[in-house]
Amino acid sequence: MASTADAGEHVVGSGVREEDQQSPKTLVDWALQILSTADPDEKARLGDLAASLWLRGEIPLPYDPSRPSPPPPDRPARSAGVRLLPPSRMPKLGKGGSAQSRVAMLHSLAHTESWAVDLSWDIVARFGAPMRMPREFFDDFARVAQDEGRHYTVLSARLRELGSHYGALPAHDGLWDSATRTAHCLLARLAVEHCVHEARGLDVLPTTISRFRAGGDEQTAKLLEDIIYPEEVTHCAAGVRWFRYLCLRSCSDDRTSYSVQETEQTIVSADDKMVQQAKDELTSKIAQDVNGRDEMAQQVEVGLAKCKLGDSIDEDEAAVIETFHRIVREYFRGPLKPPFNTEARKAAGFEPGWYEPLAVKEINVEGETLE
């Protein structure tokens, strides 16, 4: 495994002046460096290194409470070797009946996983500090980012085994388009990217696996079935878990209803005394999150334990689902597309009450919205 010094040397070699390069100290620092790395293989390698260091406790803090972190880029650095097209101009992938079709499917999967690496580190860098998220939030998305990087790496390697490579075919950036629309709101980012899109991946993966198997590519089918599919369930679960967490936390802490822009604007517009008070409060809160679960977090865990979807849905859970419906309708274009992989979604804690009502198109009748 590469050292921290190795990671810094690569970035210097890719065009960043040595005097401007600082070794990352916090997980957010690492996330920003990964987002600024264009090469997809190096992006995945750095992500694996950062997640491993964090989960072993070798990165002490998620972010530095004494200084604001630089904002993440509006768009992560990406390799110029991948030709991008609008989604409407993308060639059809086919159904895996030919070797060419299977390579196209594999290339599309590798592209999606590469973007998933950026999405996972972006949520850490963009929302973790402003929204005062607990340490477990950083744990979850470091693991997700590490998984996504591994998925990209094995898919890219499989492409090379089949005589192709990542970048040999065009791709589109629809995932980042929706990330841009949700860049100001953690609830929206969790709902759209880490619930809706992750769950959609669970819906289509069994069919994708079957197509590779039917085409005689058992090696790729097993790779998807044994490595990627079960880990994607945990990624959807992370989105559901933290969406629910924010909704429940908002009952006792209305700061979670703020967007990131609103939080920053509140601090900027305050006078010097209030700014200092806000900083002192933030520092204290971060220290509580880093050193252990505070009273609020314990209350949230109790709430999470009670939130089970079944024959009777308690009021808190009903409110969470209602919020999910509202957020998805606002930030996701169009209805959700069945058929749904209900078994995998259930394993992720994503019950039908969350998504089935969103599969029905809304119809406006004389000023009223009907479903």
Image (spheres, helix red, strand yellow):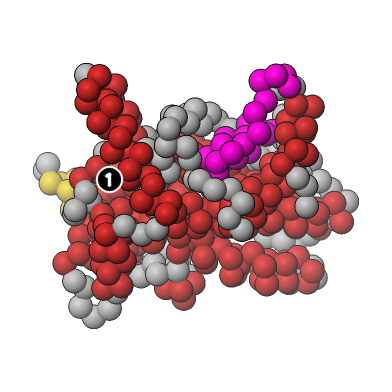
Q: Secondary structure at mark 1?
A: helix
Residue 219 in the magenta stretch? The answer is: no
Residue at the image point whose x is 54% and y is 48% from the top: 60
Range drawn in magenta: 17-38
Image coordinates of residue 315 in percent, x first then y, are: 16, 67
Residue at the image point whose x is 72% and y is 47% from the top: 45
Q: Would you say residue 229 is visible in this rendering? A: yes
Image coordinates of residue 79 in percent, x first then y, are: 71, 33
Image coordinates of residue 208 in percent, x first then y, are: 64, 64
Location of residue 42 by image quarter: top right
Image coordinates of residue 245 in percent, x first then y, are: 32, 58
Question: In the image, is 190 to the left or to the right of 248?
Answer: right
Residue named by callout 1: 256
With respect to residue 311, does 51 lie above or below? above
Location of residue 121 by image quarter: top right
Q: Amino acid at mark 1?
A: Thr
Residue at the image point whose x is 51% and y is 31% from the top: 72
Residue at the image point whose x is 25% and y is 63% from the top: 299
With respect to residue 247, does 69 lie above or below? above
Q: Would you say residue 92 is visible in this rendering? A: no
Question: In the image, is 73 to the left or to the right of 12?
Answer: left
Instruction: Check the picture and name the quadrant holding the C terminus.
Output: bottom left
